[in-house]
Amino acid sequence: MDRSPYLLNKDIYMAPPGVVQKLNAQMNQEFYASNLCLYYSDWCAQQSLNGSATVLRQQAQHNVTQMMRLFDYLKQTGANPVVGALKSMKPDCSSLEAIFRQMQDELSGRHAALARLMSEAQAAHDDAMLAMLGDFEQELRLDEALLATILHELTLARQAGLCAEEGGPAPAGDDGTDPLIFTQPRALARGRLRFSPAFSSPFAAMLALG
């Protein structure tokens, strides 16, 4: 395939309009995910689930970083990044489990859209875009694995009567903190719920900071 009209430098090609549209859509999905995390973080703070609120703010920043990766890539290809208006959100904040299940569903949608975009990059033999999207996908896979683990722990917490629900006080650990405590040494010494996958996502740093 002769792509010389789209050549910007030896590595980067201008993406076709249809691919640019999908890249913009993926970028806006990351923007939406960031704002969704901030919405959830605010609910957690209101429930005194300070560790959960903190990690959700960190995840919001992570989504913004991912958004900017796509923004910068679009600029490098000579395309015009377009950040659209945020769609309205009315998520279910009845419990931590409901929050993370909705996050899992939203992430699955983003991953499916990315897979379609990667297929187009592969069909166009655009190695630079495919490499960038491949790195992006690794981050999504990481978050998917963490969310699955968190939801498993939250199910155990609900069964033990430890999950916070809207309209009631947050259940506390022995020292009055958020019971969802993960694999940091000082947290392990304090927490009731524990697991130890070596993930680098902000989800893995979910601490009780109350």
Image: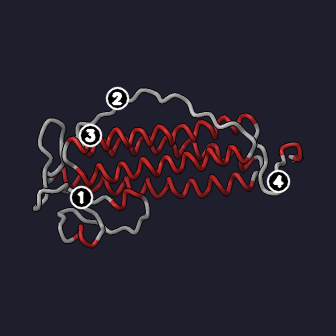
In the depicted view, which residue is nearer to us: 51 or 23?
51
In the depicted view, which residue is nearer to us: 63 or 107?
63
Q: Position of residue 14 (x, y in %)?
A: 78, 44
Single out the mark in the foreground, 3 or 1: 1
Q: Which residue shows up at 32% across the image and 69% down it? A: 196
The residue identified by callout 1 is 209
The residue identified by callout 2 is 90
Q: Secondary structure at mark 2?
A: loop
For residue 9, the mark is 4
Do labels 3 and 4 touch, CB within 8 Å?
no
The residue identified by callout 3 is 43
Find the distance from the CA under tag 3 to the CA under tag 1: 16 Å
Q: Position of residue 33 (x, y in %)?
A: 45, 41
Q: Quadrant of the C terminus?
A: bottom left
Q: Secondary structure at mark 3?
A: helix
Indicate the amino acid at tag 2.
Lys
State which tag comes first along the sequence, 2 or 1.
2
